Image (cartoon, rainbow, N blue to C red):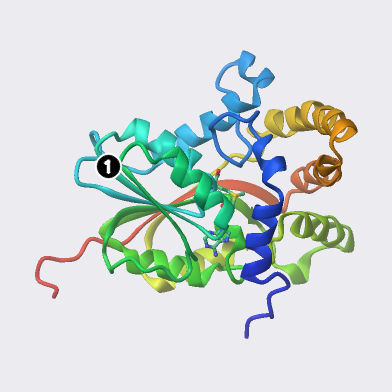
Amino acid sequence: MRNMSKYTKDEIAKHYNDFDKLYENWSGGVQGGYHYGFANKVSDIFFNDRMVKNLSNLIAESLGIVGNGNNQNIFDAGCGVGDVSAIVAKHYNEAKIYGVTISTKQCTIAQQKHSKTDKFCIVEGDFENTQFEDNFFDVVFFVDSICHGEGDDKNAAVSEAYRLLRSGGRLVVCDVFLQKPKSRWSKWFNFVNEQMLDQWRVNEWIIEEQFKKSAEQIGFVDYKAINLKWKIVPSVLHMIFTKIPLALYKSLTNKAYLKDLKAFIRMSIFVPLLGIHPIFHYQLITLQKPIKNSMEK
Ligand SMILES: C[S@@+](CC[C@H](N)C(=O)[O-])C[C@H]1O[C@@H](n2cnc3c(N)ncnc32)[C@H](O)[C@@H]1O
């Protein structure tokens, strides 16, 4: 039996609608995405937007698309303001990219950003229950978004992705993956974790063992994982040393930034505490929907 969710979908949407300034400042107000990143060269550590973009580029390269993406449909599930979609589009300029976000405000921003071309189709909706047809997508990807889905195995989101993917299609997930079930956490880990879940309106992180088991039961094969936990450390530190002073400065002139300042301070304390724990992994996972035998109907 599944637990009742602490945060409803409306509350999650409200979080993204209300915290637009915090997220606007996330990668310096430039396109890149609402996630941490990593340095490809030493100088990147001074520019969070570069690190965030490096991760978005890695996501794009992991999609397994050959060539320019001609005739390919790609689904950015939980697309934020469409920044990762924009980077994916640079890699595959013939692909059509669909994005879904649960936040009305983000959806409007993403639609405006991508209104000049018909390469993008951004809609407001729920990635656990979309209006797209079966087998419509070649790739479905989630970047720091599936964490908002139901359960510690994210069964509803993964089942929907399976329905949407064509045979041989790929699922890519980049997110927090915890390495032990809740019953084996210390009180200390539980406390720190609660602070982060509350900050980000996440009901529960993925427990990797549950996620893998559930994805394989749904039908996915070829589970591959890369742990990026230590690679994102410079990006986490960059946030601490640059975003707190910026939010502090902004909140002196505009009180609306005070809640963002509080959020950045909270993240700066609890993200490193959670992140250094061995239970915490930040992973890029790829899975495949099996290729249908030509004899099968
Ligand atoms: C941390 S942001 C990441 C955004 C984007 N993937 C990026 O990396 O820039 C999480 C995103 O997930 C979206 N989200 C959360 N729950 C969702 C749901 N059930 N359906 C669709 N989008 C959802 C939020 O609206 C938000 O855009």
Q: Is residue 3 left or right of residue 68?
A: right
The residue lying toward the viewer, choosing from 175 and 247, is: 247
Q: Few, some or many C-alpha atoms within 10 Å of disc 1 (few <14, some 14-19, many ≥20)?
A: many
**Within 8 Å of ligand 1, the CB of disc 1?**
no
In x, y percent, where is residue 150?
59, 71
Amino acid type of the residue tagged 1 in the rendering: Ala
Mark 1: secondary structure: loop
Instruction: Farthest residue to the top: give it.
Output: 43
Q: Is residue 38 left or right of residue 238?
A: left
Q: Is residue 208 left or right of residue 65?
A: right
Residue at 70% across, 28% down: 234
Residue at 66% across, 72% down: 8
Q: Is residue 145 visible?
A: no
Instruction: Farthest residue to the left: give it.
Output: 295
> Ligand 1 is in which quadrant of the figure?
bottom right
In x, y percent, where is residue 291?
23, 60
Residue at 65% across, 53% down: 16
Residue at 82% across, 31% down: 250
Residue to which mark 1 is pinned: 95
In x, y percent, where is residue 219?
36, 69
Query: In this figure, what is the number of numbered marks?
Result: 1
Q: Looking at the image, is 172 positioned above or below residue 13?
A: above
The image quadrant where one finds the C terminus is: bottom left
